[in-house]
């Protein structure tokens, strides 16, 4: 019978599962983290757990919180098991489980007083956040902070009295500290965004600009927002994973995390208020994160899009199954070699060809159980970050773009709302109704899709891209996904 996870039951967990040797009462908080979802607990919290296990920096434990209702349920589940999480790392030939305990409390969303009091605490030296790529209120076409978003407008009109957004909470905490003469905490984004520190700074100061420009200028001049590159494939948890944890390791965990063994975290070393010694557990501290971010976002996340939409249209469920499909795997390989890697500047101490091989190996991992639907999620936010910047650079350089245009056309076809076998595709984007309408019109007039300026901006007016996209979409509708990919592969080998 499975053991229900809690501090009281750690001794009952089998020897095959590692458990914390440190006790929660030995820890004190130094970090408030907003958004304690799967990726945070597989990545930042796991690094800290390893650091604590070495007997280091026990004054850097995590207090979790959030801004969404899903965060509230997550908090209730984690509280019921003393904030412990089982992290299961999986490779093709092995699985390993570890119970982690870097989080020591959770403040429910909406308890603004308690959250602000914790942000005001002098021992809070870092506020970190994982709110997904789409949670930064960025205009997809311009990549600028969207001051007109209703959530931002509400926080500004309320003058941060009861913030609805993560950035409202952060701003309120910083300004409360300023008023009391306390030094500011460092704000650290752990989301998968190019220049995530800059994006976070723009969100916080852009919001405060709407209230008091002088306060915003103080934040710009005094608060550190280090950039960072984060990487670990971490699928959503379903009953499939919870049952596997019961069967394989004898643990009943409301919120386990299953992920790959590989992980990477590259950070600017800019923490005026101090930081844990994460370099002791493999975090790279560098002067400039940008080359690492660009490599990862264009190659790994761009690669995700390349396999996701054809696989979704072909009713392929898991990512590793897409990589087992010789045609899709070949499409990814050629697209990386011909159109994406040439648009990635050199990265210190990194062989891009070796990095490509590692990506292909990671995506092919059958144990992860990552789904094609997850990779297809939120294309209206992800395409402008993962595909379109590479396309813009290729156009400026006069390089090949047919494969990137095909990825965009496959996304359009996916948003039509049914697979090639006629199976319905459930809504998979915050803008799904609009995307579906545009995709249906684009079946006969491809340019309609590119007219979405909030996504494509002036890219949709580029003659070369318009022609390549239109031709690709017409071929998909006339001949199907496989024929379209075959056509591309044949053109690149001739």
Image (cartoon, helix red, strand yellow):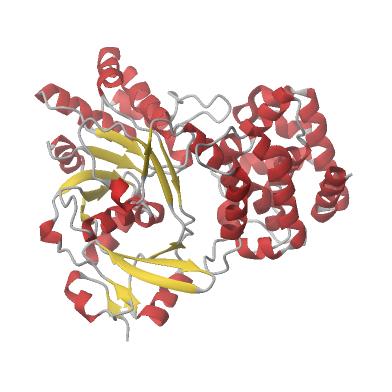
171 over 262 or under it: above or below: above
From the top left corner, tell me how far across and down residue 273 is, in percent: 20, 33
Q: Which residue is nearer to you in this view: 254 or 329?
A: 329
Q: x%, y% of residue 364? A: 61, 62
Q: In the picture provided, is 280 more to the left or to the right than 293? A: left
Q: Quadrant of residue 100?
A: bottom left
Residue 427 visible within the image = no
Q: Residue 411: give x, y in percent of width and height.
A: 69, 45
- Residue nearer the viewer, 78 or 331: 331
Residue 249 position (above or below residue 278): below
Note whether residue 324 is visible: yes
Quadrant housing residue 492: top right
Horizontal and vertical percent for residue 254? 33, 68
Tell me the quarter of the image containing the N terminus.
bottom left
Left or right, residue 268 beside residue 65: right
Q: Residue at x 59, y 58 (%)?
A: 363
At horizontal 55% and vertical 55% (from top left) the residue drawn is: 374
Residue drawn at x 45%, y 31% is 195
Up the image or down, 393 lies above or below 121; here it is above
Left or right position of 219 against 437: left
- Of residues 420 and 401, the one nearer the viewer is 401
Q: Is residue 380 above or below residue 9?
A: above
347 vs 25, nearest the viewer: 347
Q: Hey, which quadrant is residue 145 in on the image? A: top left
Count of number-bearing discs: 0
Residue extending farthest to the front is 349
């Amino acid at each position: 019978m499975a053991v229900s996870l809690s501090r009281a039951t750690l001794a009952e967990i089998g020897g095959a599962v590692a458990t914390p040797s440190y006790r929660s009462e030995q820890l004190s908080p130094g970090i408030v983290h907003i958004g304690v979802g799967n990726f945070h607990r597989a990545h930042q919290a796991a690094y800290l757990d390893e650091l604590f296990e070495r007997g280091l920096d026990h004054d850097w434990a995590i207090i979790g919180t959030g801004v969404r209702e899903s965060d509230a349920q997550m908090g209730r589940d984690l509280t019921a098991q003393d904030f412990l999480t089982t992290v299961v790392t999986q490779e093709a030939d092995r699985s390993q489980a570890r119970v982690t305990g870097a989080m020591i409390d959770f403040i429910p969303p909406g308890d603004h007083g308690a959250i602000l009091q914790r942000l005001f605490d002098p021992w809070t030296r870092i506020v970190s956040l994982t709110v997904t790529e789409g949670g930064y209120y960025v205009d997809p076409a311009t990549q600028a902070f969207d001051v007109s978003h209703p959530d931002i407008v509400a926080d500004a009109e309320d003058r941060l009295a009861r913030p609805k957004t993560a950035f409202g909470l952060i701003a309120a905490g910083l300004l409360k500290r300023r008023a009391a003469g306390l030094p500011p905490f460092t704000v650290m984004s752990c989301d998968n965004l190019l220049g995530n520190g800059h994006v976070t700074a723009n969100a916080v100061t852009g919001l405060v600009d709407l209230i008091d420009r002088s306060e915003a200028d103080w934040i710009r001049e005094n608060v550190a927002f280090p950039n960072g590159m984060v990487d670990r494939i971490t699928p959503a948890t379903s009953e499939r994973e919870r049952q596997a944890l019961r069967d394989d390791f004898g643990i009943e965990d409301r919120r386990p995390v299953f992920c790959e063994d590989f992980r990477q975290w590259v950070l600017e070393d800019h923490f005026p208020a101090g930081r844990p010694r994460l370099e002791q557990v493999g975090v790279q501290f560098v002067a400039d994160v940008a080359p690492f971010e660009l490599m990862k976002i264009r190659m790994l996340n761009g690669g995700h899009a390349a396999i996701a939409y054809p696989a979704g249209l072909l009713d392929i469920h898991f990512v590793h199954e897409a990589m087992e499909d010789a045609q899709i795997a070949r499409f990814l390989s050629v697209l990386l070699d011909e159109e994406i890697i040439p648009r990635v500047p050199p990265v210190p101490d990194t062989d891009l060809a070796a990095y490509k091989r590692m990506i292909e190996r990671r995506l092919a991992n059958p144990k992860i159980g990552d789904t094609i639907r997850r990779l297809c999620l939120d294309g209206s936010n992800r395409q402008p970050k993962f595909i379109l910047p590479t396309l813009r650079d290729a156009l400026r350089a006069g390089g090949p773009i047919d494969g990137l245009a095909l990825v965009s056309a496959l996304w359009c076809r996916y948003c039509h709302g049914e697979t090639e076998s006629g199976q319905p595709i459930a809504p998979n984007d915050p803008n799904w109704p609009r995307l579906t309408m545009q995709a249906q019109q684009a079946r006969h007039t491809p340019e309609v899709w590119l007219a979405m300026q909030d996504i494509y901006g002036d890219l949709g007016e580029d003659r070369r891209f318009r022609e390549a996209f239109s031709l690709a979409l017409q071929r998909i509708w006339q001949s199907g996904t496989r024929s379209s990919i075959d056509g591309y592969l044949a053109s690149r080998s001739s």
